[in-house]
Image (tube, rainbow, N blue to C red):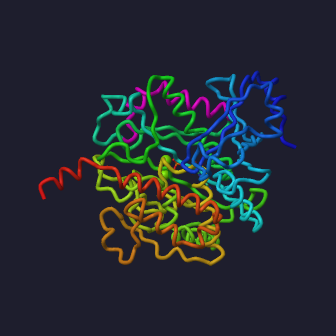
Amino acid sequence: MAQDLAKLAREKGIRYFMISYTDLFGAQRAKLVPAAAIADMQKDGAGFAGFATWLDMTPAHPDLFAMPDASAVIQLPWKKDVAWVAADCVMEDAPVAQAPRVVLKTVMANAAKEGLHVKTGVEAEFFLIDADGNAISDAKDNASKPCYDQQALMRRYDVIAEICDYMLELGWGPYQNDHEDANGQFEMNWAFDDSLVTADRHSFFKFMVKSVAEKHGLRATFMPKPFQGLTGSGCHAHISVWDKDGATNMFYDAEDEMGLSRQGYHFLGGIMKHAESLSAITNPTVNSYKRINAPRTVSGATWAPNTVTWTGNNRTHMVRVPGKGRFELRLPDGAANPYLLQAVIIAAGLDGIHSKADPGERHDIDMYQFGHTVKNAPRLPLNLLDALRNFDRDEGLKAALGLDFSAAYLKLKQREWDSYAQHFTQWERDHTLDV
Ligand code: ADP
Ligand code: MG
Ligand code: MG
C-alpha cells in the first residue's frame, strides 16, 4: 500500500509537492502542487502537455499524466515546505513506453523475472563555476594537479558540507567528499542501492547540488567537459547483481582471481559487447565525446577511457574491477540520464548473461601509455553521431530497452546532432577562410 501523501504533508509540514519526471534529454519537469490538492493528484496524476518536453510527442497527443511514486518522495532538506516526488508517465491509462523511469522499471522487471536484482552506486562529478557559467568560481583553485586539494576543498566547505549534511539527513549513507582532478571539480559519494533507488537519488542529487550552489551564489554543472584541457566530469557506475532478497551478491566468487562469478563475467561481457552502442546513452551529448578520446589533460591524465577494455584495479580502462563481487564502468559522464544509465547497464548485462558473453582478455597495463600495444581493442565512438549509428544498428540492445523508447531516443538525438552540425563555428573560419 503506497503511503498517503496528504497524510505525509500533515505530519511533516509539507506545503507543496513537486511532482517530477525526467524526459529523454534528462531534464526534470515538474508541477508544484499544493498539499490541499495532492490527494487527487496521487490518484489521477499531474497533467502535462508531452510535446512541450523531450518525449517525442506531438501537440495533438492527449494529456500526459505524471503519477507520483509515493515510495520515492523526498522532503527538500533545504526547503522543508516542499517535497520532490519522482513520477511515472502515463497516457490514456497506459505507461508511456519511452519515458525514462518507465524504461528502467520495465528493464528491471525483466531482470527480476530471472531472479536478478542489480545494485549500483554512481559517482556524479560536477564543477562549481561562477553564476554566469564562464569560469571556475574559485580563482585560487589553479593547481596543475588539483585532485584532493585540501585547501581548495575547504574554500568550498560551506557548499559541500551543506549537501553532505542533507544526504546524511536523508539516510543515503554518504561517506566521503573530495576535490576532483580538475580545477573547480568535486565528487561526493553515497552508498549503492537498487538501481531505481540510485536513479532517483542521482536525479535528486543533481537537483540538490544545483540548488545549493545557487543558494551560495554559484552554479554547479555536470557537463561532461566544460573546460578544454581539464579533466571532464564522469559518472562512473559500480555494479553488482543480487538475488531476490538482496542478501547474496551473485557476482561474488571468493575462489576467482578477480572475485567475480561466472555470471559476473557474462554480465561484464554484455557491457563490453554493447559498449560502442550503449555509449549513445551513457555519453549522450555532443560534448560527451570531448571527455572520452581526449588528449592528456593539464593534470596528466583524462581518467576517461578511449577503448573497450577491462582490467583489475587500474583506472586507465573502460572497466575496472576494484574489488571482489563488483565492477566499475568508467564510461558514463555527467550528462547521462540517471534512469537510462541504469536501464542500459541492466539491458546490456542481461544480454551478456543470456548469450554467455565473454568479456575478452583482461589487460593489466597502463592503457594511456601502452594502449597502442593492445591489438584489436575496439575504439569508443569518436562523436555522438557514431554512437547513435552504432546504437541504431544494435537491434538486440534496442529491443532490450524497448523499441518505442529506442526509436524516440534516436529520433530526438539525431535532431540534436543535426542542429549541432548545422552550427557554424569559429574553427571552420580559422581553418577554411584562406583555402
Ligand atoms: P572510486 O572513486 O574508487 O571509483 P567511490 O568510492 O567514489 O569509488 O564510489 C564507489 C561507489 O560504488 C559507491 O557508490 C559505492 O557505494 C558503490 N559500491 C561499492 N560496492 C558496491 C557493490 N558491491 N555494488 C554496487 N556498487 C557498489
Ligand atoms: Mg570516486
Ligand atoms: Mg570511480
As displayed, is residue 181 above or below residue 274? Answer: above
Question: Is residue 150 covered in magenta?
Answer: yes
Q: Is residue 242 found left or right of 146 in the rendered image?
A: right
**Residue that appears at 47% across and 60% down:** 313
Is 77 in the magenta? no
Percent x, y of residue 319: 48, 63
Indicate the quadrant containing the C terminus: top left, top right, bottom left or bottom right.
bottom left
Residue extending furthest toward the front? 60
What span is colored magenta in the figure? Answer: 147-170
Residue sitting nearer the eye, 79 or 268 = 79
In the image, residue 332 lies at what x, y percent? 49, 55
The correct choice, above or below, for 5 with respect to 322 in the image is above
The residue at 59%/67% (across/down) is 398
Q: Nearer the viewer, residue 393 or 110?
A: 393
Tell me which corner region of the image, top left, top right, bottom left or bottom right, holds residue 372.
bottom left
- Give x and y (percent) for residue 213: 49, 28
Which of these two is toward me, 406 or 434? Answer: 434
Asked if 107 appears above or below 358 in the picture, the reply is above
Q: Position of residue 49 (x, y in %)?
A: 66, 42
Residue at the left extreme of this rendering? 434
